[in-house]
Amino acid sequence: MSKLIFYILILVSSVALARPEIIKEGILYYSDESFQTGVVKDIVAEKNYEEVYQFYTYYEVVYDAEARVKIFKEYKKGEVLFEEHYSYADDGKVTSEKIIGE
């Protein structure tokens, strides 16, 4: 049982470390990698726009004041493939998700 808890802690800490180091509300963040927790998609390591634009697929995220994903977009060849908008209840649970595109 303790081994299982250890592996879960490693997984959770690696996901937490994967996000951008400094998160500010309303700022655009980019990456060529993403992950999903529940219904919410997020980016992995932050990269600058010039760096990700060269990739076939890249992602853009906007966070809220609580460092939660507010808007997630996936781009292919510079065009928005799809976009998701999230809102949260007072307890932090996702209350709505709006999907635009595919």
Image: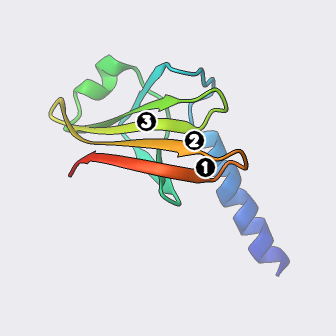
| Residue 71 x %, y % | 43, 35
N-terminal-most mark, 3 or 2 = 2
Give the residue displayed 68% in from the left and 55% down from the top: 12
Q: Amino acid at mark 1?
A: Val
Q: Nearer the viewer, residue 69 or 95?
A: 95
C-alpha separation, residue under disc 1 versus residue under disc 2 = 5 Å
Secondary structure category for the residue under label 1? helix
Secondary structure category for the residue under label 3? strand
In the displayed structure image, the side of residue 42 where residue 82 appears, left or right: left
Give the residue displayed 53% in from the left and 60% down from the top: 38
Q: Quadrant of residue 84?
A: top left
Mark 1 closeness class: few <14, some 14–19, many ≥20 residues within 10 Å: some
Residue 36 against residue 65 in the figure, above or below:
below
Residue linked to disc 1: 15
The circle drawn on residue 18 is: 2
Q: Is residue 43 visible?
A: no
Extreme residue toward the right, this view: 2
Q: Amino acid at mark 2?
A: Ala
Q: Is residue 100 visible?
A: yes
In the displayed structure image, the side of residue 90 where residue 102 appears, left or right: left
N-terminal-most mark, 1 or 3 = 1
Residue linked to disc 3: 71
| Residue 47 x %, y % | 43, 26
Kindly check if marks 1 and 2 are in contact, taking CB atoms under 8 A apart as contact: yes
Residue 21 against residue 96 in the figure, above or below:
above
Kindly check if marks 3 and 2 are in contact, taking CB atoms under 8 A apart as contact: no
